[in-house]
Image (cartoon, helix red, strand yellow):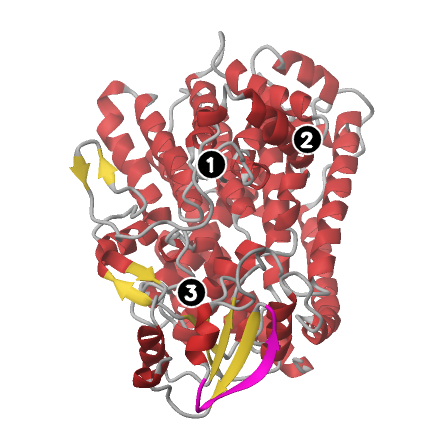
Amino acid sequence: MLGAERYMLGVAELAALAGFATLGAARARSRLLAELEGPPAWLATAVLALAILIWVAELLGSFGHFQAVPYLLGVAVIGLGIWALCGGSSRRGRGAAGEGTLRPPLTAGGRASARGREGGSVAMGFALLLVLAALAHFATGVRLRLSTGMTGFDSTWYHGPLAVEFFQTGNTFNLHYLAPQYLAWFYPASAELFHSIGMLAFHRDILSPLLNFGWFVGCLFAGWCIGRAYRVGALSLALVAVGLSVPVLGDQAGEARNDLAGIFFLLAAVALAVSLWQGQSERRFSAAALAAIGLAAGLAAGVKLDFVPVALFWVAGLVAIAPRGGRRGALAAAGLPALAGGGYWYLRNLAKAANPLPWVRHLGPISLPAPAQALGGREGHSVLSYLTDGSVWAHWFLPGLHQGLWIGWPALGGMALAGLLLCLGRGASPLLRLIGLVGLVAGLTWLLAPTSAEGPAGMARGFESALRYLTPALILGLAILPVTPPLLPRARRLVCLGPAWGRPVSGRVALLCAAALLLAAIAFGGWEQRRYLEHRYAEPGFSTKGLDAAFRWANALSGARIATTSTREYPLYGRDLSNHVQYVGIEGPHGGFVAPTTCRTWRRLLDAGHYEYVVAGRDRIEPGRPQFPPTVGWTEGPGASVILRIPPTTVFKLTRPPDPSACP
């Protein structure tokens, strides 16, 4: 458990990181995007601050120096450097930073309207009730994981292990090999960096179960900013709250999944675009505005593969709606920040595999470099391939939609689709048309993805879980629905119903309230972290009995070297995250990595890795197969004593290097 002094040291480190990054981001935003005021300005500052935290981690991690002290110094230098280089800011920029009041949205004529002030509407009150319900529902899931540790399959398979590897090695550029499924070691990992930042601060993962709650709040805020640009923020906020609460996103609570982080950056790009568009009388973007939108889109692509087509389309669309004479400049202004936001991981893949997307092995008739191995996991099928298959609809798609998107999924999906399609209709601005197309591209990405309906032919077992790949399009469509031309006049009338709630909130009062909440959160966190670390994987019950026992055993270890055959490996790192854990495999050309198939190879790998323990087992018990995998027999022998043996897992302690020549 962390003592009070160590806990407060970690809190101070996180506060310093956030402070320096925000200082530089706020100054850059006020100089480059002075037209933004109030919440959209805060959102732009947040995006820039998050980008600074990511960039410094990537820069240091490329040379193996992503460590606590260099990272803090790096963020401080960058933040203070931007603050000094950008100099003073305009009067409007200073007002946007929060020194004045929180201004109401503008009317169509550009004047603040008491009647149009959303803070005083019945719609805003209803939206806040929905938001509170959504937050409470999500917080319940977070609370559960604070009592158990992160137990989701993807969290324990690759999200968590990647974050720990960044933390342990300080290196973000090398490939960190995982169980050989889906080439997961090539995945973009910007979201995992934030888990690593928490680990650097506390040398524990006490921040990890809370991060998705922050992304959840960020999505709500960005959704409100989208509608606020048109004076219907309450309706956009309410619809985004509903979209974020669908059951398929329930496994984001308290876990290391990264879907919410990607959705946040997508919504932030849209919110910045509509806010900057509404603030320009000529209805065209400045170079700085294009850079901000492109950066947010690129940051989404740096989180998850699914957002790569979305980011590319964003940049192409921004170029298309630019004036003809300025399209080259628009491409540079939007494209370069997008590349800076998410290109790091794909450039890393290019350096390691000679292919930025190693999953793509053919480009038409052209063969591309890629690891010569099967992707593993379930058999790949797309939703598109089953669209006319009535049996799959009856047995998998309809039940999956019902479970993943609630019983009201036809209404929810219809509203989202209507929002995107109405953006393309008559009277829509070029920007709204672009946003509608971006949302449709996000939906089409899900429709075509070979992971959207995984499973044996005719058995789309992965469909329900893969609905989370549809949620970016779903939530964007809901957020944009109230601002579409046919619905906007009615939405404004609805928002303006009801009496005003009084004067605008003072910026100082808002800051004082935020400070009080922050202090309360720090005090509560000090108590909660003790409880969390005490219960973390103390009684695991989310895998097979054998693996659960191995997780419980490893949780108490410190500094051990553990070889494993388990896809779920995160709990093996121990409570203090000091165990070295490695799925045993063979590295191949172009970043390939496969499991050994012979006893001799297995024993050579164990000897080369200088492992102290071996956790040999399967992730599930399958009828008709032996209780234990062959690696158990390959490990048994002199110098390998059994610590525990519960099907389908055996844990060995190695007292001397295994002898390949003694294989049975």
Residue 76 position within the rendered picture, expressed as x and y whole percent measured from the top left: 43, 67
- Name the amino acid type tagged 2: His
Q: Residue 92, percent across and down?
A: 51, 39
Q: Between residue 257 and residue 539, name the one nearer to us.
A: 539
> Dot 1: what SS?
helix
Image position of 572 (left or right of 140): left
Residue 638 included in the magenta stretch of the image: yes
Q: Main secondary structure of the magenta part?
A: strand
N-terminal of the pair, mark 3 or mark 2, is: 3
Residue 301 horizontal side relative to residue 219, left or right = left
- Element assignment for label 2: helix
Task: Locate the N terminus and report the quarter of the image it occupies.
Answer: bottom right
Query: Which residue, given by chain and number where applicable, does mark 3 sit on?
Result: 75
Image quarter hosting the C terminus: bottom left
| Mark 3 residue type | Val
Residue range in magenta is 637-647
Asked if residue 4 is positioned above or below residue 291 in the image, the reply reads below
Compare residues 641 and 442 and report the one nearer the observer: 641
Which amino acid, by three-letter code, is at mark 1? Answer: Ala
Closer to the eye: label 1 or 3: 1
Q: How dense is the environment of label 1, judged by Cα within 10 Å: few (below 14), some, or many (20 and up)?
A: many
Going by the image, does 199 lie left or right of 431?
right
Q: Which residue is mark 2?
A: 402
In the drawing, what numbered circle is on residue 269?
1
Using the numbered discs, state the Cα–Cα distance from disc 3 to disc 2 in whole angstroms.
46 Å
